[in-house]
Image (spheres, rainbow, N blue to C red):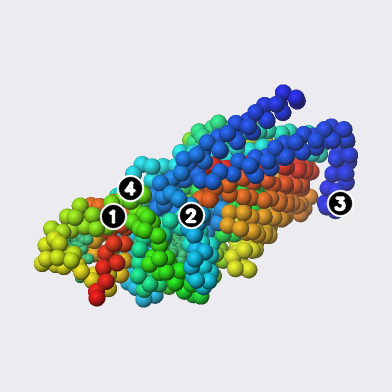
């Protein structure tokens, strides 16, 4: 009865230290009020600058995003055409070749290729409960993230490049470069292909809307971010070689895309191959297929297959290593209804990994089934309400099984400039569940307010 | 704990100041919030309605001034709006497209004088000046001015904006015409001028 047990633990732990909770709530109220005021009054009329691509074409962020950083269909095409604006696909006019798109590009300028400050200031307050420990409350106001991007095309050629330099991540100053790749795009506006090599995200924005790691809510679906007991997580950036093909029908009624990536993976223990010893073989393959079947609505299928060394009981006398297989298969879909006002999204990801018991060394498996359902309601352009429910059911051989992790989040997001490059957000989230290996129950409630600057 | 909240408020205030300052300077293409300066109250009711559809739909991906600062014939606008309709992530249906094209064509022929040639607001010379500046006149003429071996009179009736763009950016291989080195904004300005040259 894992669910009942969990409820019991929650009751016990949340009942303690009432007055501390009250004080916490009052402070929370003040901070929330301050941030709401900020969002309502600081809304500037014109932004001073926008990131590189918008700057390049004098476009607003909405040309390619529903609300940054969530990409729309045009943003998806822009990416797949090697950072060139998709041409209008009028059935009566000639189809432009990629080189025509390249020739139409404005002059190459540094300012049209670099975006210096994509940063997020946030206030967050969290109350967490872990089984066997006193509940704790924390709050912080911080620069949540600060990234710089350099992306564009090599003038008069069909080569493009993209790199991301992260200065601050999750409030920690930790400079690193999760993305740095170069690619070539061929074909024409209707039927194109590309190939890239370099360091790139395994998953981010490869796919239709529901398969994007980016969301209107502060955290991505559990199934992208959660690390299974084999230390594998979809949201990682290995070194890869990738190729993809895209076909669009007239007027973009349908778009089909396929992608295959071969990566060197990350080590099973989570460390990166580039920065640590690479004697372990961690090659893996990612493939996905996307179909946008109506403006802004689509479906994506993904599969990931890899095999890597997994160290158990690291550093202990009974340390052992096995070479386990990791598999993920998923389907993601979204549908926009009500004249592009309401977006209904859902995703499913199945995991099936080899697993060896850390105590007995007995072979077994780690099975997982993750789901999410999300609704985004775009009240006005650049102003949306969002809510999501996530559930991850995990089943490890020899564990108490199955166990569940659950999360819900709800929030409101509003662009504060006409271009859409400054975005404010308020969100509340709740997470609880049982760790499938340690069997501990934990819960936390998060309040978040952030303001994101894109320059 | 107290000190912590004091610091938080300070940081919030700093944030507010930063965002307000960030708002001060307007980008060059954002000159004159077109919507507020445009007075359509004297326009016929159906055109006023067309303006509202235009203001809602055509501001999604770029500023309205991008459309208001170029000049097209009614057929030219129908085609331009159609092109916008045929872009990915465009949400304009045929009825709206018709209303928008009507409004833009009406606006083009009824705008007050000082709004004519608004391109110069962005620092780009007018299309006619560019015809000379970019040495097109070395081989072509307009209304008899320039080299009359290849007159471009009436070119707006023979060629669409995108055909012109193609010709200027990548002339037919082996022809005498050189590919231009002009900037994107200059080319756009030149083309919006060329499309107005209708045959009589």
Whether callout 1 and callout 4 share a subunit is answered yes
Q: Which residue is mark 4?
A: B123
Q: Secondary structure at mark 3?
A: helix
Q: Earlier in the sequence, mark 1 or mark 2?
A: 2
Camera-nearest label, 3 or 1? 1
Image marks 2 and 3: residues in contact by CB distance under 8 Å? no
Q: Quadrant of residue B12?
A: top right
Image marks 1 and 4: residues in contact by CB distance under 8 Å? no
Image marks 3 and 4: residues in contact by CB distance under 8 Å? no
Q: Quadrant of residue A80?
A: bottom left
Classify A248 as above or below A432: below
Q: Quadrant of residue B151?
A: bottom left
Residue displayed at 29% across by 67% down? B196
Q: Secondary structure at mark 1?
A: loop
The answer for how far apart the CA atoms under marks 1 and 4 are is 9 Å
Dot 4, how many residues are within 10 Å of its Cα: few (below 14), some (14-19), or many (20+)? few
Q: Which residue is mark 2?
A: B37
Image location of residue A12, percent across then percent down: 88, 41
Any part of residue A170 in sight: no
Image marks 3 and 1: residues in contact by CB distance under 8 Å? no
């Amino acid at each position: 009865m894992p669910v009942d047990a969990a409820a019991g633990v929650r009751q016990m732990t949340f009942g303690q230290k009432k007055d501390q909770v009250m004080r916490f709530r009052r402070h929370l109220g003040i901070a929330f009020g301050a941030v709401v005021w900020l969002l309502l009054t600081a809304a500037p009329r014109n932004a001073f600058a926008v990131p590189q691509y918008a700057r390049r074409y004098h476009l607003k962020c909405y040309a390619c995003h529903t609300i940054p950083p969530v990409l729309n269909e045009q943003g998806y095409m822009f990416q797949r055409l090697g950072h060139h604006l998709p041409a209008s696909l009028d059935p009566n006019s000639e189809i432009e070749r990629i080189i025509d798109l390249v020739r139409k590009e404005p002059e190459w300028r540094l300012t049209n290729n670099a975006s210096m400050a994509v940063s997020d200031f946030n206030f967050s307050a969290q109350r967490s409960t872990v089984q066997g420990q006193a509940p704790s409350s924390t709050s912080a106001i911080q620069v949540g993230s600060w990234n710089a991007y350099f992306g564009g095309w090599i003038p008069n050629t069909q080569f493009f490049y993209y790199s991301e330099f992260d200065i601050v991540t999750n409030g920690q100053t930790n400079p690193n470069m999760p993305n740095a790749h170069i690619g070539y795009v061929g074909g024409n506006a209707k039927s194109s292909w590309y190939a890239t090599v370099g360091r790139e995200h395994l998953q981010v924005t490869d796919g239709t809307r529901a398969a994007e790691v980016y969301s209107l809510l502060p955290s991505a679906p559990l199934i992208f971010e959660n690390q299974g007991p084999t230390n594998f997580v979809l949201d990682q950036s290995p070194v890869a070689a990738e190729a993809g093909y895209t076909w669009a029908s007239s007027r973009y009624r349908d778009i089909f895309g396929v992608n295959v990536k071969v990566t060197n993976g990350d080590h099973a223990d989570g460390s990166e191959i580039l920065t640590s010893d690479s004697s372990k073989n961690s090659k893996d393959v990612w493939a996905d297929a996307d179909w946008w079947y109506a403006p802004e609505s689509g479906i994506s299928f993904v599969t990931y297959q890899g095999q890597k060394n997994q160290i158990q009981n690291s550093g202990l006398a009974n340390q052992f290593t096995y070479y386990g297989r990791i598999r993920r298969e998923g389907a993601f879909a979204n549908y926009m209804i009500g004249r592009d006002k309401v977006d209904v999204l859902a995703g499913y990801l199945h995991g099936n990994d080899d697993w060896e018991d850390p105590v007995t060394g007995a072979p077994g498996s780690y099975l997982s089934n993750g789901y999410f359902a999300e609704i985004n309601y775009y009240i006005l352009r650049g102003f949306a309400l969002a809510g999501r429910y996530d559930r991850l059911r995990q089943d490890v051989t020899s564990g108490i099984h199955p166990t569940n992790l659950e999360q819900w989040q709800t929030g409101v997001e509003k662009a504060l400039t006409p271009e859409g490059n400054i975005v404010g957000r308020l969100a509340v989230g709740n997470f609880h569940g049982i760790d499938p290996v340690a069997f501990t129950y934990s819960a936390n409630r998060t309040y978040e307010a952030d303001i994101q600057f894109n320059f | 704990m107290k000190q912590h909240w004091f610091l938080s408020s300070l940081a919030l205030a700093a944030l507010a100041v930063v965002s307000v300052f960030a708002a001060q300077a307007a980008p060059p293409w954002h000159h004159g919030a077109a919507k507020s300066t445009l007075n359509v109250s004297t326009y016929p009711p159906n055109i006023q309605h067309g303006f509202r559809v235009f203001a809602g739909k055509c501001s999604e991906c770029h500023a309205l001034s991008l459309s208001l600062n170029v000049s097209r014939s009614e057929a030219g606008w129908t085609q331009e709006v159609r092109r916008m309709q045929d872009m990915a992530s465009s949400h304009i249906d045929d009825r709206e497209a018709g209303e928008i094209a009507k409004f833009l064509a009406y606006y083009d022929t009824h705008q007050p004088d000082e709004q004519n040639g608004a391109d110069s607001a962005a620092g780009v010379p007018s299309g006619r000046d560019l015809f000379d500046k970019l040495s097109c006149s070395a081989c072509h003429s307009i209304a008899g001015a320039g080299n009359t071996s290849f007159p471009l009179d009436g070119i707006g009736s023979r060629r669409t904006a995108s055909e012109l763009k193609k010709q200027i950016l990548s002339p037919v291989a082996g022809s005498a015409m050189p590919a231009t080195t002009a900037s994107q904004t200059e080319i756009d300005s030149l083309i919006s001028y060329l499309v107005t040259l209708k045959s009589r």
